[in-house]
Image: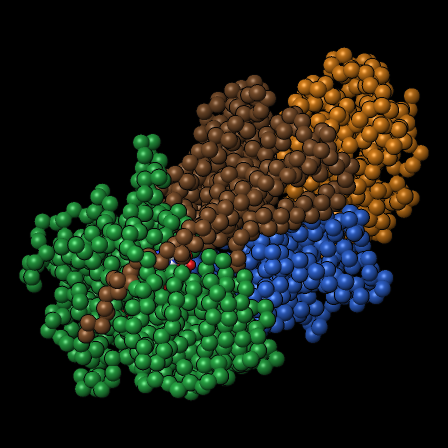
Chain colours: A green, B orange, C brown, D blue
Amino acid sequence: MAPPDAAPAAPPPGPDEGPTAPAVLEAVGIGKRFPGVVALDDVSLTLRRGEIHALVGENGAGKSTLIKVLTGVHRPDTGEVRLDGRPVAFARPSDAQHAGVTTIYQEVNLVPLMSVARNIFLGREPRNRLGLIDFPRMHREAAALLAGFGVTADVRHPLGSLGVGTRQMVALARAVSVRAGVVVMDEPTSALEPREVETLFRVIGDLHDRGISVLYVSHRLEELYRICDRVTVLRDGRLVHTGDLADLDRMQLVAMMLGREVSEVRRHGRTGFGEDHHPDREAVLTASGLTRRHVLDDVSLELRPGEVLGLAGLLGSGRSETAKALAGALPLDSGSVTVAGRRLGRPSPAAAIRAGVSLLPEDRKAEGIVAGLSVRENIVLAAMPRLSRAGVVSRARQDRVVQVFMKRLRIKASGPEQKVGELSGGNQQKVLLARWLCLEPKVLLLDEPTRGIDVGAKAEVQALVDELAQEGLAVLLISSDIEELVEGADRLVVLRGGAVAGELTGERVGEGELLEVLAAHAPAAGSGPDDEEVRHDG
Amino acid sequence: KEEGSGSASPSSSEGAQVVQSPTAAADASGSGCTLQTYGASKLDLKDAVVGFSQSEKEANPFRIAETQSIKDEAAKLGVKKLLTTNAQSQLPKQISDIQDMLAQGAQLLIVAPLNSGGLEPALRAAAAKHVPVITIDRKINATACKDYVAFLGSDFVEQGKRAADQMIKVTGGKGKVAILLGASGNNVTTDRTKGFVDQIKAQAPGLEIVAQQTGEFARDKGQQVMEQLIQANPGITAVYAENDEMGLGAVTALKAAGKKPGEDVKIVSIDGTRNAVQALANGQYNGVIESNPRFGPLAFATAQKFFAGEAIPEDVIISDREYDASNAKNSLSGAY
Amino acid sequence: MKSLTTPRSAGAAPEPPAVAAARAGDRRRLAVLVQRQGVLAVLLLLVLVSSFVFPSFGTLDNARNVTVQASFLAIVALGMTLVVITGGIDLSVGSVFALGGVLAAWASQYGMLPALLLPLAVCGLLGTVHGLLIARAGMAPFIVTLAGLLAARGLLLALTDEGADTYLVPHGSAFAELGQGTVAGFGHPVLIALVLFAAGGLVLQRTSFGQSLFAVGGSPDAATLMGLPVARTRVLVYTISGLLAGFAGALNAARLSSGVTIIGVGMELDAIAAVVIGGTLLVGGAGSVSGTLWGVLVLAVIQNLINQIGSLNSSYQSVVSGGFLIVVVVAQRYLARGPRTT
Amino acid sequence: MAELSPAVRRGAVRLPTPAWFQAYGVYAAVAVLVLFNAVFTDHFLTGANLRTQLVQVAPVVIVALGMALVIGTEGVDLSVGSVMALAAALLPLYLGYGLLSALLMALAAGAVVGAVNGTLVAVVGLQPIVATLALFVGGRGLALVLADGQLKQIANPGLLGLGTDDVLGVPVVVLIAGVLALLVAGVVHRTTFGRRLVAIGGNRAAAGLAGLPVKRVLIGVYVVCGVLAALAGVLATARLTASDPSTLGTLMELSAITAVVVGGTPLTGGSVRVLGTVCGALLMQLLRATLVKHDLPDSTAQMAQAVIILVAVYVARERRSR
Ligand SMILES: Nc1ncnc2c1ncn2[C@@H]1O[C@H](COP(=O)(O)OP(=O)(O)OP(=O)(O)O)[C@@H](O)[C@H]1O
Ligand SMILES: Nc1ncnc2c1ncn2[C@@H]1O[C@H](COP(=O)(O)OP(=O)(O)OP(=O)(O)O)[C@@H](O)[C@H]1O
Ligand SMILES: [Mg+2]
Ligand SMILES: [Mg+2]
């Protein structure tokens, strides 16, 4: 699926050398501290040729930092990085890339203003005879490459116009198409749909077959068990365990990550969700006929206090747009939103917030955090008027709120004054959740709330959502994690192409049923990307 | 003939320009630029389109008076159309200004150049159309009677020299002088500095120049620099400002520092604006060398003579007046 | 534990959004086109209207004059465009322009080659120093190039005895011809500027270097992580800006026949204005050289129009140009806004 | 591990470390310059001289405070110098109706210009630099039209008093600048307006989604900047004892931006350093004073200024941890 000239040449040793395969990339005794935190303390990791190696740990355990040390973004304070047994000192990411180590970083790191194709080929554009960039060829190759990942986007569009999931696939396509011996993936699936995840696994399988090593970070443990050979567990910046994944069961793994006893872990369920809720009859939020050309097509739905409504759909089906429309953040051609009997006038986020509707946006970096401000300021951002008197902010009131939420969501930071940009991805997400919860909303719209959150925290967030619904909050849950959606939601609305394709209630809320609805409306196979998919699987 | 006969229409108003050189005798000798040598054709100013290119914003008394005088004289003579432009202190703009006026059919150009060099393209464009150019107030580095007809104006070096003479007179040739320079890189600054410094060196070794700092021809900059200098050199007894605005800024600065301008510290400057002459009359100032901006009558008279076939000398230097404590009160109405 | 059931059966790409996306994309491209060429539309409108109102505006002569005058700013603004696309700014261009002119005029006594090479060498070096301080020492472009503005002006004053000396370009020399000659009535500087813009456009749009400029401006972190030579790109772009400003200065000296010292003050603002009017984002990551060219021409035409209006007092001239500027940029903004939503 | 942990270091004697310099670089540079002058410049450490420096820097500080707020929103305001001129031009026109009405008119003009700028930026969506460029060009022209191009001597004792009087031995101008600095610091750190402004500068999309009144705050910021610039124009006029719209405030935009940036506020928005801005202005003032007092020719002075700015900012620059 990668274009022929971009496909890495297979290194001589086969994929099945087993545990004796030579080390390709090694971290030896790495220490790294940031002002106020020790991110890594004497951590070692060995990535063998052709293996798929899982790196796991709680949010803030130091996974991303380790990856950044391995790939030349950060310089280690102590210890060294070895490639093929020789010590290397990557001064910058390009050094690592030239040495054959490519990386997909946790925060999608592409250039939003540039086109998809340019992003994919940045720094290695195909040239024509005059030495100039050959755009037709570049577009062709980019489209072909993306088709292999099931992405149909126009490669000439600015990357920023795509959904987060699609962007993640583009980043993957870029990384994989580079000639490399090692591919590092930091939470590649957190933004992906089950379907894309399958595509990714197929790609990883290909890499594996070609003897390329993969270092794989994910909070979705099922994934690890499906594809990884060995695992390294970090906790609080220290190495806890390295070994074959098959030797550990899931409970043991979780226990190791959290630093608790297995028995303690076993008591909790698979997700943090409890029983179904018993919502009121009266809807607190009613949306009718939400329409926006090319994006939303006559979407109507109701949210009742005390229920969790799941919004399901495939990538680009308009779930995020629906949530934004409900929160007044998307100008509409027609349609209305009524909250607690009152129709929202000119839609704006401020009006929606005043009416009690809060939206946790899916693009954390671009639409959520203000990276340069502290945890405290990020949490109180939307609630500022309530926490101030006559326009003067009250530090004491802020502190009270911030303390409560930092504790309740177990936000891991050196303190409320740490810059949010310095937090690990999962903790940034928790900060955002705190921002919306401290508004005490009537309706909470959650767009991918558990993306990038570790198992422990994920269960906490899920339990929290449950608890909030019990307390009478109306929750709209968007998630690419079908398990989460099915377990958590009392009712499911399925979107397709920006329109409501079906609804599942009561007993019918189940994985099988959901997949059925999604499938029922899918057009017959035949469009480009799916042909590819079939051929590869065959 | 008495001095000043060169001015064809002696203005009745006070403060009119008086030509200092060439004297009438030299004028009569016939050397100079004529219509034939220049290659232009005869023109009656009444039917003519005349262009005037001003160099700097009409935001200080000199420029205001200069532009006004050109406009007044054009109206008085009944010139068919007077085009005016202002380069706003930007040389490229002055070039395009002149070219634009040529494109709009100007048949005579009066130019107040922003700088001695750099007007070549504009002059070439004028020459291509055989449009005579008269430059006023600043002289340009170009060939007279080829690139332009003549220069009318003051001699800036001479102004500096005369300022030095006045300074020597009011200080008795002793003391410490600070110079407030004009804008850097400007040839008016260079000339007024050179004239002053050379004359002081030659005539009054007892006058020590302790500081030369630019006040950029502006009052507030002059004031700020003076405030600094007076702290650093409390012994300063005299200030030479290369224009009146900076001199007046120095007055304010000295007052604020508890010195008596005009007495503790002598001040001499160049231009002859009303405010400066007033300060002189009030005793806060010690001397002003005039730089007369009223070029209208002289410029048009020169043009008329030129078109009438007379030879025009390369430099028509006007005689600038001097103000001192004795004549300030009476001359006030002549200041601009 | 096989919880992640493969939803392959459901996996066909949903047709409507893809089609919709494509259509939305067409509109977006149109928006980009108008955004880039909105200035051109405004420019054409301006030219058309003024040709009717002022008979002396729409003449070939006038076009020649306006274009020659604009060509120097254009060359400087070309460098500025590249810098701004990387998210930087170069305040030094006005001083460097003047310095280039003085150096060229001085060196022109030794012939054409020194007259071109000396300013290029000095100004390019200055640009490199800016680039190194910005890219390697991590200093803010604004501050570094502000210091460059002062330093270049200081150097120029030192070279000319505080501005007292004006070096002249020998009459009729090949160097003078470079600035003064014409082809089909259009001055050499116009043609040179056009060639440079064509080259600039090619470099920006069709080379890896050009792509890396966009990437560095659009997201420096991403560019670093994608392995682009961010620092080298920055150093290079400031060097290019210095070279172009110095070259424009030299060309201008050839045209003026002298190394004028008082020139170029405030030119950086004009250049930045042209770049921004041309649709380039000041925060970096997006822009085009063609837009800048139109931006320069818009500014030149506005100035020309004010002269056409004739006997305006200098104060009114500023008021009118300010007003014009608002009208032009607002018009362009609304033209460019088109279907965009936010 | 030779390096001490931050916790340990806190207890030890504090020596200026690189991190310290980064945070306090401007202050250190100011201190160094004062020290240098104390030793090498005659008559520097006199009350009169320090007073001169403070009085001269006051208008720059006032403008820079407004500029810092604008820059905090990822904007920039080029029109401040023209606003000063506009305020100066309006004063003599309205002094006839009393000092208060003249002051109000001047400040109102600043507010109007700010509102126009803010609207162009927030509502029309222009890039701040072009939005404010229009009034940078037109504003001074308007001022000159109002003043008929003339410098006008001011005789109103009340107004002149603003420029020359003392309160408790402190010049009024300095007092006003000081109070405003405290006020702006308070606004930035303690009010919803200030915190919103910083958040908008940090991430405008996120601020919008969090329901902040983005447009209102932006317009407000430009209005504040305009009013402060107008006030600076009034004070500078009082000091000059004349209304001089042709030169007052020329290049002020550059001085103000420089003060802000040298003071450590990033041009990319999202943070405002008020004390840094004040010290940035002070640094530039002392630098100019030093060069004038040592009577360096313009060429040398400009080059020296360039080098010193670079050194000061180099030491204080934001280092990326890696
Ligand atoms: N640039 C930085 N400056 C300061 N602290 C940092 C920086 N980068 C990371 N940290 C800190 O280092 C620790 C490890 O962060 P890291 O991003 O490696 O976590 P992670 O294991 O990837 O977590 P997640 O699963 O949430 O992505 C965290 O406490 C984080 O706050
Ligand atoms: N595979 C794709 N091909 C083309 N365009 C896409 C694709 N995926 C998303 N898009 C574009 O991104 C836009 C945003 O989609 P939106 O965010 O509403 O979808 P979503 O259902 O929330 O999916 P997700 O959040 O998982 O990306 C869509 O309108 C569509 O134009
Ligand atoms: Mg991470
Ligand atoms: Mg989404």
Q: Does residue C193 sit above or below D197 in this rendering?
A: above
Q: In the picture provided, is A318 more to the left or to the right than D142? A: left
Looking at this view, is A44 or D322 the one in front? A44
> Looking at this view, is A425 or A69 the one in front?
A425
Asked if residue B200 can be seen in this view, the reply is no
For the image, the number of numbered tags is 0
- Check the picture and name the quadrant holding the N terminus of chain C: bottom left
* Rendered location of residue D294, percent (x, y): 58, 51
| Residue drawn 16% across the image and 62% down it | A52
- Residue A317 seen in this snapshot: yes
Q: Position of residue C20 (x, y in %)?
A: 43, 54
Report the front residue among B142 and A214: A214
In the depicted structure, whether residue C107 falls above or below residue D223: above
In the picture, measured across the screen, residue B43 lies left or right of residue A187, that is right
| Relative vertical location of residue D249 with respect to residue D235 in this rendering, above or below | above
Nearest the viewer among A180 and A348 is A348
Residue B3 image offset from top left, x and y in percent:
88, 25
Q: Find residue D73 and report its image quarter.
A: bottom right
- Residue at x 53%, y 77% (from the top left corner): A339
